[in-house]
């Protein structure tokens, strides 16, 4: 009986090798003397935990390396800092709630939902105050959108710096929001004819405020209370945040407590001294709201080298545009001499992250990997030099230039610039 089982398994392995072995794996031939197959592991020889061991599920202990990370020297204090999304450990298009990058200017506000209020005041017919329950009585909608901080990649303006896409590109997350269209709430208050701008304000100690033109407020902004199906996380603005699709992350006010309606922009700190683009001649470009098309290869990358040696290799990454969808992603293996079409897989949604793959046979020689996104307006992601030609050397924000990873013969990757 055992003999028979063994020989039929061997036949099965051989068949598998003939069918698929040439394409990918080479390990199957060792199967007969592989203790991972021939010896029973503890998880097979004993019972596991019962159903209620983890009432709120957590990842496998073997995934402990998958976590947000920060760069201690980047900011003076953790209460006004950033913790980056581990893009190199993720797949698909949705960022899990516990891994969404977090950026706070005054720490995480722990808001009691029972005491939560949203006030609408200023140029409205009827100033209003809503509780969380009130907000949940409006018709709601579900939308997947990326949020990218305008400072994402800011350290890379003058050249390659941080070694890992978590740090160079990890100020982005892509989440399904459930919320009420802001238009419904503003309609309820009734806009006066001279209402041209809104000023959302946060309930955190930073009391974050940004001026947003009324056209955007009435177009696709959401007052959101859920992310990926559950209540917002405290880091993301629990219980309510503003969603401003395609526009820079700073405008997505968390712990939203008030929306003032006005007739002109307020020019507060976050839209004058911060989040504006300093040009070569010393002038600052006023209001850069939309996040232009951008992409990055997440695997391989410095934190995720190629470990399997030469042969069949899967390159993957993400692309997004604040102006619509991504139509194409091109990948180069030789620093931009030859570009090839990558395969976009998964939902292609408006102002949402897209996933791309590029499969090829690696001959083991060094690579200069880059990706380049083309969005639904036809806009092509620029090189860093093309960006500098327009914006100069002094900028920080809105860096959507093409990223290069140098992959060595060993499979190790490092951040370099080729542009
Ligand atoms: N809202 C409040 N109230 N306080 C803040 O510090 N930070 C802003 C924005 N909204 C901030 C805020 C910035 S700069 C960004 S990039 C995003 O929130 C970050 O959102 P996240 O923490 O969900 O990643
Ligand atoms: Co930001």
Image: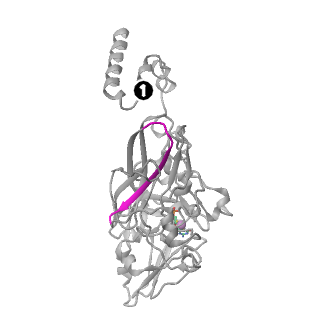
Asked whether, in this view, residue 341 is left or right of residue 52, the answer is: left
Image coordinates for residue 100, horizontal then vertical, percent: 50, 56
Image coordinates for residue 15, horizontal then vertical, percent: 31, 21
Whether residue 282 is visible to the viewer of this picture, yes or no, is yes
Residue closer to the observer: 349 or 368: 368
Which image quarter: residue 280? bottom right
Check residue 157 for magenta coloring.
no
Q: Residues within 10 Å of mark 1 (few under 14, many from 20)?
A: few
Q: Secondary structure at mark 1?
A: loop
**Residue range of the region highlighted in magenta in the rendering:** 362-376
Residue closer to the observer: 139 or 70: 70
Image coordinates for residue 195, horizontal then vertical, percent: 40, 87
Task: Tell me the chief SS of the magenta region.
Answer: strand
Residue closer to the observer: 254 or 412: 412
Screen quadrant of the N terminus: top left
Q: Residue at x 33, y 60 (%)?
A: 349
Whether residue 250 is visible to the viewer of this picture, yes or no, is no
Which image quarter: residue 82? bottom right
**Image position of 376 with respect to 313: above or below:** below
Residue picked out by circle 1:
26
Asked whether, in this view, residue 124 is left or right of residue 74, the answer is: left
Mark 1 Cβ and ligand 1 under 8 Å apart: no
Residue closer to the observer: 190 or 146: 146
Check residue 363 for magenta coloring.
yes
Q: Residue at x 36, y 61 (%)?
A: 374
Indicate the quadrant of ligand 2 in the picture.
Answer: bottom right
Image coordinates for residue 167, horizontal then vertical, percent: 56, 55
Q: How are the colours assigned in the image?
A: one colour
Count how many numbered circles sit on residues in the image: 1
């Amino acid at each position: 009986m055992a003999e028979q089982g063994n020989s039929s398994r061997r036949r099965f392995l051989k068949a598998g090798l003939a069918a698929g072995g040439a394409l990918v794996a080479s390990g199957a031939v060792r199967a007969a003397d592989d203790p991972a197959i021939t010896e029973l592991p503890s998880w097979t020889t004993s019972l596991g935990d019962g159903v209620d061991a983890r009432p709120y599920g957590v990842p496998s202990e073997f995934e402990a390396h998958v976590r947000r990370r920060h760069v201690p020297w980047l900011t003076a204090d953790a209460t006004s800092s950033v913790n980056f999304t581990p893009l190199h450990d993720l797949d698909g298009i949705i960022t899990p709630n516990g891994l969404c990058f977090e950026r706070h200017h005054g720490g995480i506000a722990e808001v009691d939902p029972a005491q939560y209020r949203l006030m609408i005041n200023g140029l409205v017919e009827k100033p209003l105050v809503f509780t969380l329950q009130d907000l949940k009585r409006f018709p709601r909608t579900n939308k997947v959108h990326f949020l990218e901080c305008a400072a994402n990649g800011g350290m890379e303006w003058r050249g390659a710096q941080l070694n890992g896409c978590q740090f160079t590109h990890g100020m982005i997350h892509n989440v399904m929001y459930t919320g009420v269209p802001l238009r419904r709430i503003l309609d309820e208050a009734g806009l006066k004819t001279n209402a041209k701008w809104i000023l959302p304000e946060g309930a955190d100690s930073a009391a974050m405020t940004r001026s947003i033109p009324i056209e955007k407020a009435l177009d696709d902004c959401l007052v959101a209370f859920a992310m990926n199906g559950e209540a917002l996380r405290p880091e993301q603005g629990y219980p309510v945040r503003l969603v401003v699709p395609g526009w820079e992350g700073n405008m997505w006010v968390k712990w939203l407590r008030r929306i003032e309606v006005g007739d002109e922009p307020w020019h507060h700190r976050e839209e004058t001294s911060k989040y504006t683009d300093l040009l070569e001649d010393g002038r600052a470009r006023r209001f850069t709201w939309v996040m232009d098309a951008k992409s990055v290869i997440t695997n391989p990358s410095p934190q995720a080298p190629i470990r399997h040696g030469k042969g069949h290799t899967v390159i993957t990454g993400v692309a997004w545009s604040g102006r619509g969808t991504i139509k194409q992603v091109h990948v180069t293996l030789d620093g931009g001499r030859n570009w090839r079409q990558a395969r976009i897989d998964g939902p292609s949604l408006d102002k949402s992250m897209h996933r791309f793959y590029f499969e090829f046979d690696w001959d083991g020689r060094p690579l200069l990997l880059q990706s380049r996104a083309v969005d639904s307006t036809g806009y092509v992601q620029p090189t860093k030099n093309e960006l500098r030609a327009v914006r100069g050397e002094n900028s920080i924000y809105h860096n959507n230039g093409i990223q290069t990873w140098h992959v060595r013969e060993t499979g190790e990757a490092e951040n370099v610039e080729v542009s």
